[in-house]
Amino acid sequence: MAVSEKQLKANRENAKKSTGPKSSEGKIVSSQNGRVHGLYTDKLILDSSHLKEDRVEFELLLESLRYELDPQTLSQDYLVQKIAICYWRSRRVIAAETAHINSQLNALDNDWKYKQMLSGLVQSVVGKYEVTAEETDAYIANRIGMNSIPKDEFSKVILRYELHLDRQLTRCYRLFHQLKEREELAEAKRLKAKRKKLLE
């Protein structure tokens, strides 16, 4: 349906009248209009046949951080979302590390040859001393326990990634608080100017 010249002109005139909120409170409310979901939620949440993450759980984390940190501007809210993402990824790192350790332990526990080798090692260490089955099992369990801390390349990658996330989280918190302080100072100046104007 074509728009007439008259209607087009009326639309333009009406658009000039709507300049958005004027008060600080109105601007804050308006800045939160598009804040239903996180910026990266669609790309962040893993949803595959092997690993399904809960979108609602992430949204609850994000809303909890918004409640705690009370962002007042779009920039502050962006940083709160980045903080939520760091927490979410840190949780994923812990899950990956736990799965890796469990995999290693299960492989050791299920590997009959490994147990036999350890049993032979126990016998060679103690030599002529008689060793009970319980002592052998305790020694083997101890050796398996020592392998519960990953020492391979995967653990180095996990550690680097965790350190990266910690630095990013610290940086986001620092920037958030700097922005919040700046906004509070600017608001205090606006109120002071408003009072001064009222008193004149």
Image (cartoon, rainbow, N blue to C red):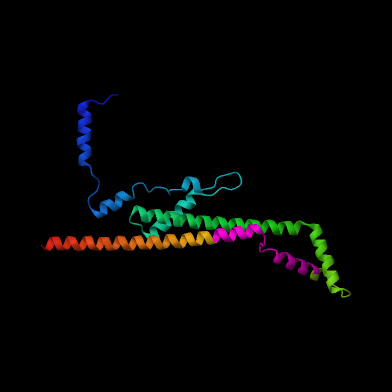
Picture residue at 54% right of the left edge, 57% below the top: 91
Query: Relative to 91, is 37 on the left or the right?
Result: left
In the picture, the quarter occupied by the C terminus is bottom left
Q: Position of residue 47 (x, y in %)?
A: 55, 45
Image coordinates for residue 145, horizontal then vertical, percent: 70, 66
Is residue 141 shown in magenta?
A: yes
Residue occupying image coordinates x 70% and y 64%:
147
Question: Which residue: 80% across, 65% down?
Answer: 118
Kindly give the residue lying farthest to the top in the view shown.
1
Q: Quadrant of residue 127?
A: bottom right
Quadrant of the image occupied by residue 62? bottom left
Q: Position of residue 76 (x, y in %)?
A: 37, 56
Q: How far across and how far down the image is residue 46, in percent?
A: 54, 47
Is residue 45 rendered to the left or right of residue 99? Answer: left
In depth, the one of 111 and 170 nearer the eye is 170
Picture layout, residue 52 above or below residue 170: above
* Magenta residues (range): 136-162
Question: Relative to 142, is 35 on the left or the right?
Answer: left
In the displayed image of the protein, which residue is found farthest to the bottom?
A: 129
Quadrant (top left/top right/bottom left/bottom right) for the N terminus: top left
At 76% from the left and 56% from the top, the residue drawn is: 110
Q: Dominant secondary structure of the magenta stretch?
A: helix
